[in-house]
Image: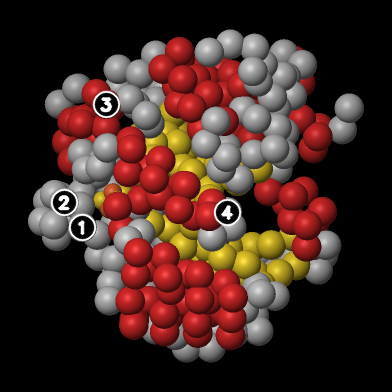
Amino acid sequence: MKEMERYTTFPEYCRKTFGHKLFRIALDAGMTCPNRDGTKGYGGCIFCAGGSGDFAVRYEGQKLDLSVLKYIHHPEEPAGYIAYFQAYTNTYAPTERLEYLFTSALQDPLFEGISIATRPDCLDEEVLCVLQKLKQTYPEKFIWIELGLQSIHEDSVVWMRRGYPLDVFDKAVQELKKLDIPVIVHVILGLPGETPQMVLETIRYLNRTGIQGIKLQLLQILEGTDLAEEYRKGKVRELSEEEYISLLTACVAELDPQIVIHRLTGDGNPKILLAPLWSLNKRQVLNHIMQELKTQNIVQGYRYGTSG
Ligand code: SF4
């Protein structure tokens, strides 16, 4: 069996669906987050160092030119690009502004589609109407929504100060499904107090929701976050690479094979990463993951539907 076939990788999915690879261009459209400005909470999620927008390009609807995006690896094979609204909560702004920003990206010939990272409690009827209208206006482009669920477990949710209950997530996924908008869910492995069994419960739950994609990521401790303080006080410990890989490969085995895996490890800014430092060597971590999948003869979905 070819190693690429052990799980549904994002590049493979893109080749099959679009005929070539797709790369995300991370954008910072100057949003904030209701979990930081006091609407839902102050200080944000405990691990948040700014909504993951560390490498994002400031975006105000201007036409983007690849030559100015220095961090993009110019691929040898043909590729396309996704406008990835990444920093903070990208549906948390007046709908006129959202419509302007998303329309600008959809009209830009550089982009084949847009992916919008947001919170499920920031997808009210008005926002959904904008998304529906854009989907109808630009049928040749795609619109994806990325939701940071992280866990289904209430204790973890309270600890991380996520600020919305699970039924809000469920409702958002159902509404997006009605609009035929694919959903990619972010899950964190290594949350304090979560046993491997609890992580697998989150995966099994997601298998039943009809989502299209998942980002499995390691809990990374970033400088400047409240999590970093907890870590310094010894209240939080980092996962070892062996623990992470064991947990991750169990998730791959449990995950519905239809769900595309967009990420398998952490992607925090290396300049502010406190721990785990082994995650800095991403290529090596990915090699070790592939090795483990091979050694255990795990393919995605190998245990799907066998328990829970
Ligand atoms: S919802 Fe996202 S942007 Fe807001 S605090 Fe949490 S991680 Fe940060």
Residue 68 percent across, percent down from the top left: 55, 82
Residue 40 percent across, percent down from the top left: 16, 51
**Amino acid residing under circle 2:** Lys
Q: Which of 137 and 75 is in front in this view?
A: 137
Q: Which of the numbered marks, if any, corresponds to residue 303?
A: none
Q: In which quarter of the image is residue 128?
A: bottom left
**Amino acid residing under circle 4:** Pro
- Is residue 302 among the parts visible in the rendering? yes
In three-dimensional space, the C-alpha distance between marks 1 and 4, rounded to whole angstroms, equals: 23 Å
Q: Do the residues labelled 2 and 1 touch (CB within 8 Å)?
A: yes
Please tell me which of labels 1 and 4 falls first in the chain.
Answer: 1
User: Farthest bottom residue?
Assistant: 62
The residue that mark 4 highlights is: 182
Is the residue 95 above or below the residue 169 in the image?
A: below
Q: Which of the numbered marks, if any, corresponds to residue 34?
A: 1
Residue 41 percent across, percent down from the top left: 13, 49
Please tell me which of labels 2 and 1 falls first in the chain.
Answer: 1
In three-dimensional space, the C-alpha distance between marks 3 and 2, rounded to whole angstroms, equals: 17 Å
The residue that mark 3 highlights is: 154
**Amino acid residing under circle 3:** Glu
Q: In which quarter of the image is residue 58?
A: bottom left
In three-dimensional space, the C-alpha distance between marks 4 and 3, rounded to whole angstroms, equals: 25 Å
The residue that mark 2 highlights is: 40
The answer to whether mark 1 is within 8 Å of ligand 1 is: yes
Q: What element carries label 3?
A: helix
